[in-house]
Amino acid sequence: MADNNTFVDTTPTAGNGDEYRDPSHIPDQNGFTGDIQNGIVDAKSRTLATWLRQKQWGIDVREAMALFVEWLSTKWASNKAMIDDNVSRQTAVEQRQTDLEGKFTNVISSATSDSEVIDARDSANFGKFGTIDARFENIEALITKYVPQGFEVAINHNLNRMPQVSVFTYDWAIGTETNGLDTAPSGLFGGSQPVSVSNQVVYSDVNNVKVILPADYQQGGTLEHHNGVWYLIDGIKTLKFVLS
């Protein structure tokens, strides 16, 4: 058995398929020290870390690692219980809010006695609404999604003619994936299915056109021209302009 007074660290040697191939020490300043120094490390974590660093006997090092695993499990279980409780509370709050909004709508609906106002809640095309506001909100939602107004894209095409313009939108095109190639959600490699976008075209002259789109499709990005097609790309979203 080793003498505590003469214990020394030994130089590692290769073996077991040369898995231990790096004899260099971990530098004092590394990718973790900044987070640790600027963060909060509790006393128990420091104790375990000190044991792992300083205990001379392998059995003590292994015990420190085992304690860490078991202690981490208790922390995880405690945090999970707290998160589950918070989610449950949030769900209950949202449900109460929904119920309150429903009751408020019912109060407004019941409080109205003017027959003309009551009649204005109903739509021959879209059915009945609890309040006039709900009907207006539905109209606004349809306008922003389908009526070409609110977003303009100017294209200098230099075709010396007035082309027809078709617009399509899709997400997750190759090259737009957030974390690189083939990181789109399952089933969307290469992009989602293109959807035709209603538009209105204003011809400034034979070389320039303004394409007016519904407000729902407003996005940033820089207009790009590839193989006769124009693209406006903003993150994972793409607007494709085909001039024919």
Image (tube, rainbow, N blue to C red):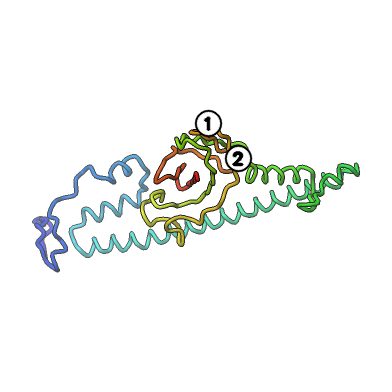
147 or 52, nearer to the observer: 147
Q: Secondary structure at mark 2?
A: strand
**Is residue 239 visible in the rendered structure shown here?**
no
Q: Position of residue 235 (x, y in %)?
A: 45, 44
Report crowding for label 2: few under 14, some 14 to 19, many 20 or more residues within 10 A (C-alpha).
some
**Three-letter code, disc 1:** Asp
Residue assigned mark 2: 200
Q: Amino acid at mark 2?
A: Gln
Quarter of the figure with residue 141: top right
Percent of width and height locating residue 56: 18, 58
Q: Position of residue 172 (x, y in %)?
A: 45, 52
The answer to whether residue 130 is left or right of residue 228 is right
Q: Quadrant of the N terminus?
A: bottom left
Which residue is located at x 54 percent, y 58 percent?
Answer: 84
Residue at 37% of width from left, 48% of height from top?
42
Q: Can residue 242 be spotted in the picture?
A: yes
Relative to 172, does residue 60 appear above or below in the rendering? Answer: below
Q: Residues within 10 Å of mark 1 (few under 14, many from 20)?
A: few
Residue 183: x and y in percent read 39, 56
Judge by depth and name the residue closer to the eye, 12 or 113.
113
Mark nearer the N terminus (1 vs 2): 2
Q: Which residue is mark 1?
A: 205
| Residue drawn 45% across the image and 61% down it | 186
Using the numbered discs, state the Cα–Cα distance from disc 1 to disc 2 in whole angstroms: 15 Å
The residue depicted at 60 percent of the width and 40 percent of the height is 200
